[in-house]
Structure formats: C-alpha cells, structure tokens
Amino acid sequence: MHRSRASFLAPATLLAAVVAPPPSPPPAHAGAAVDSIRYTVIVTDINRVGLNVTNYGFFGNNFNSRSPSFEYPLGSGFEHMSRAGLWVGAIGIADTGAFVGVSTAIVDNAQGTSALAETEFTPAGNAIVQGSRISNSRFFSPEAISDQDLDGAYSDRPGRGPRGPQGERHTPLGILVEQRTLGFSLEAAESFVAARFTIRNLGPPLRDVYVGLYAQLVSGDKAAYSTWPPSATSGPGSWYYKTYAEYDSGRRLYKEHYCERPPIPDGCNFAYCPPWAGVMLLAASPGGVAGKTVSFNWWTYSPGDASRDTDVERYAILSNGQVMDPRDCTPGLQCSPIVVLSVGPFAQLDPDSSVTVDFAFLGGEDETRLAEHADFAQFAADIGYRLPAPPPSPRLHVETGANRVDLYWDDSPENEVDPTSLALGGRDFEGYRVYFGADRLDPQRVAQFDLRDTTGFNTGLDGIRLASPPVIGDIAYRNHFAVTGLRDGFKYYGAVTSYDIGDVQVESLESGIPQNKFLAVPNPPPGGATRGVTVYPNPYRVEARWDQGRSVRDHYLWFANLPRRAILRIYTLSGDRVFETRFDGSSYRGEGARGLYEPRRDRDTPPPALSGGSYAWDLITDQGQAVATGLYLFSVEDLDGGGVARGKFLIVKSDREN
C-alpha cells in the first residue's frame, strides 16, 4: 500500500462512527425528451480504481483508447477489463401476451467496436451527474453518499433491431434504470467502486426479475503495447487468452489475474501485471441476497454464438442457479472467459415500483488483499455506504522552479465539522501530511504538521503559515511548503492530506491522496531570449533518463529558460524547418508530449504543474515523422521582450529509426 499507517480499518471500528441516517436512493428521472438525449462517459478518479462509466449500462471502454477501462491501481497502466454491462431479465406482458425478455447493455463483440451498436438501453437525459460528500469539492452535494457519486439513468425503450451483434429484435420490458456508482478515497475503501442499479418498472407488471452483470476481465500492461487497441504485433503477443480466474462463492466474487501459461502459478509470470481484479455481487433489495438465487455462468468469448443470441437463452443464463468453475478456462489456450454474475428472482415488480442490486469493481495488490478489499466493500454495502469521513484534503496550488516544487494550500479542513466526532463542536481536525516522490503509485510522507494539543508531534502550524497568503480566484492559500534539491526535468508526484484526532471509538482518519494528487516537473522559471535558452539532455542519446523503460513514442527532451511567450523553431543543418510551435508558458501543460502527460491516459492527476518557461518536445516533426540522428539548430523568438536566442543540439541516435 502507499502509506505506512494502518491500511485496513476493522469494520467494527468504523461501524461505531456511523450515526447518520441511511442515504436516499438516486432520484427518479422523468422521461427525457428525444433532443435532450446524449450518450456520455466519465472515468472514476477519486480512488485507486479508474473505471469507465456510461449512462447506457456499459462499463469499460472496449479498449477504444488508452483511457482507463478498468485500471488498477489508477496511474499504473495495468488494465483489467475490456468491457462489462448490465443484463435485466423478466417475464413481461405485451399486446400479444406474456413474453420472456432480457434487456442487455452488452453481448460478445470485438475490442475497439462501439458500445452504442450493441446496448439496448437509451440514456434518459444528456449527462452523468457528479456529486461528492467532500465539503470543499466543486461537486459537493448534501445528497451525495460517497466522495464521488456518478448518477445516470437509462431506459430499455424503444424497441429496435436487430442490429450489430444483437441478432434478435429487442422487445422492451418497460424499465428505467437509475445507476449510481460510488467511490471513496478513505484508505480502507480506496480499492473498489460500487455500482448500484435501481430498476424501476414504467410498464405493466413484471414477474421473476433477474439482474446480472456481464464482464470480460482480462489483465495486462498497456505500456507494453506500442499501438492501441492492443494487437499481437504491437506488444508481447495477444492481450487475450492469458487469464487465470476463480469464483469465490462465499463472497460472490469473480477474481482474475494475468497468466501467460500453465503450470499455475509457475508459468504465469504474475510479475508482468501484478494486481488482481474482480467483480462481486454486494446487495439486493427488497429481500436481500440470502433469499434469492445467485448464478455464476461463464463461457469463452464467441460472438454470434447461437446458444446465447435470444432473450429466452439469456434469461436461462440469468436464472439457472449454476455456479460454474472458471478454472476450467486454461490460460495460454484459446479460452477468453466471459462471465455473468446474476441474482433473482424478484417475484413481482409492479408499475412504478423498483428493485435495487449492487455490484462492485475492485482490485488488490495480491490475492489476499483483494479478499480484504472485497470484505470491506461488503461491509460498506451492508451499512448503506455510511462510512465515516475524515476532514477533506485542502485545496492545493502547485508551482515549480529550478530544482524545487512549492505547495500552497488553504485552511478549509481546519473548520470542518464531523457530526460523528466526540470533539468539542465536532471540530476534530488535527493536522496535515505532505506526500512527495518520483514513484507515481507510492509518494512518501515528507512532512507532517499538527496542532499543538495533547496528541501527535505538536509541531504547530506556524511553520507553514503565510503572513500574506496569495489569493487565486477566491481561494486564499494560507499554507506553504517547499520541496527542494530536485532534479530538473523529472516528474514528481504528491499530495497534501488532512487527518483528524480520532477518539476512543475510531482511530484517526486521513483524507485520501487521490483528492488532490498532483504531477509537477521542476525547471527554471521564464527567462528571456537574451538570458540563454537551454536544451537537455544534449546530446540526446537514444533516450533520456526519464524515458527509461517507456515506449519510444513517449520520449521527449526539454527546452528550458524560455521566455513567457515565444515561438520555437527547429531546423536541420541544411536549413529545413522540421518543427515550429507558439509557446505560452501561462497555459502550456505538456500538450503534445505523450510521455509527459496524456490526458486520456493519465487520469490520476490533473495536467502537470510546470515552470512557465519549459517546453517538452517529443522528437516528432510537424509532418508527424520521427527525427533522424543528427545535429539540429533552434531559434526562440521572444514575443514580449524582443530578441532571438539561437542554439544547437545533437540527437546521437533516434531509436524510432529502427
């Protein structure tokens, strides 16, 4: 885990702090006008699970981009799922009488294809609404349950098809699904995202309703593939057919790990993609899970298979009560498991009534921790996700300079009131912790500041208080801490968290690192054309130190000491211009240098904090070609102060030539 303090809070300890009333379910959505419908996606980023969520019942992104599909830990590049989605089956009533219907968001289909071609759900609105219980979040809502609620709704109307991979015409059950995903940054809960489906009947009565989650878990390392979607020729062979899977019936947990080939585990090469991933059934209402049939079915990926292409066949999968063993799918052979985990029946669903089923997407650093995270997710579901909340992380502003990063934050956590606390007035804030380092997934604690009272180090906050705090927007950043002695041009990650004093019932709780996790690259501040622009590394020999171990498409070098506003031009010795860009240090955030920051892929931080006088060039010409080995000339035209700086740099060998 990424922090040295206790990584797992006992459910009984947390339960003592829970005094709030149960959260209300997501609000009902009225039928949306046709012109207000929009298919929308959001990636969860409040904890260590990066899950692609839609407002049409589909989860994951089908590997359409390097953006997280189900990435764990978020920021690692370890991907665990191509696609998943909701299945709802029931016996309905149509003009012609009773029928067996299954409304599906997903069926077997190839990676890279559009989910819109296969979902039988239509958004009931044009957005996914984000809410948060974190008081200083811009998404704060008193109605929020978790640190990141994502609410969407969709209907299985109208009838359609057949189309795409859906070979049978879709007959609607007449349901509206109110979907809410829940994510927590509390350390004990940071490895799962819950998905709650409230299924409301808008039509005639439905009988024997079943709800299932279809999933294709398949793990690997995105960084090992030079192109995307992954192919056998762009990386270490096919992404698929390398899955070891188990089903834990006691936890209703399907778990999966990368495995190259038998024997297991010796032939698996677990180190290639270390984490485990899973999906689990958490809850069902009314009646609970215990009184219902839980089915776990799997088959090997087979688009268009005639045994699963009708609603009658899919309903049988949802309701058959089987618990199949996915270990029968041998890694390294032509087996890529697809699973459906389902629960039911809900005997009768009358008009305007609803049932609710909760699943979880979760990860673990190893199999033991996956089980621990599953147990905590179950505990959270059992108490209605009413988890205690530490004070929020402060609002953070990051600046960089030569060999340093400066952190400024506000004091909003210090006035937070915790209704569960025994402290006077519920004000139990105790201090701040600063995390920093080059390890993206494990920044280390480098400083701690706490109140002068009866606990902790009693450092006081005077050492970080600013007499004249800068005000940016409407936020006064009253606290400051500098990290110095850093290497220019290298990436550093960090966060500032808050923690409370704790009491005899609940140990001290700390806000989550993901709440304000940042990426910063130190470099000199803006200069002028007459102060000397530098290029480094110079010469550039195959790769820079920060490029090591990365795909060649992620390499870059730095121009530093640039004026605040400038035009950068690069030429060959013969005078041919190979690259030109207009630079504005006040707005530049690493655009174009994929290895520095790629917004679709790098979802665990906002864009990097840069010095305002540095530019990362990815060694690609204006024509999209890789530069060749050779000596290059550059000029930098200062758009404010006038003057032109000139220089040269050497690329000894470009590995893109191979």
Image (cartoon, grey):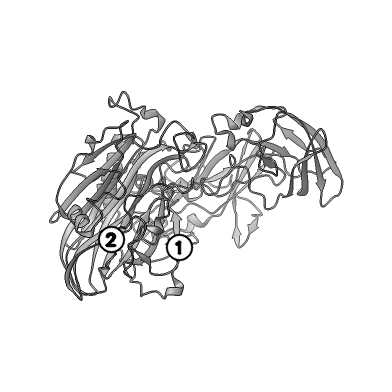
Question: Can you see residue 361?
Answer: yes
Question: Can you see residue 506?
Answer: no
Badge 2 element: loop
**Quarter of the view holding residue 596:** top right
Image x and y of residue 285, in percent: 21, 61
If the image is split into quadrants, where does the C terminus sit?
Answer: top right
Q: Nearer the viewer, residue 181 or 475?
A: 181
First reached walking from the N terminus: tag 1 or tag 2: 1
If the image is split into quadrants, where does the N terminus sit?
Answer: top left
User: What amino acid is at disc 1?
Assistant: Phe
Left or right: 338 with respect to 577? left
Residue 168, which numbered label?
A: 2
Crowding around mark 2 (Cα neighbors within 10 Å: few <14, some 14 to 19, many 20+) is some
Residue 140, which numbered label?
A: 1
Residue, x 82% and y 46% (percent of image)?
637
Crowding around mark 1 (Cα neighbors within 10 Å: few <14, some 14 to 19, many 20+) is some
Residue, x 32% and y 30% (percent of image)?
332
Image x and y of residue 203, in percent: 24, 74
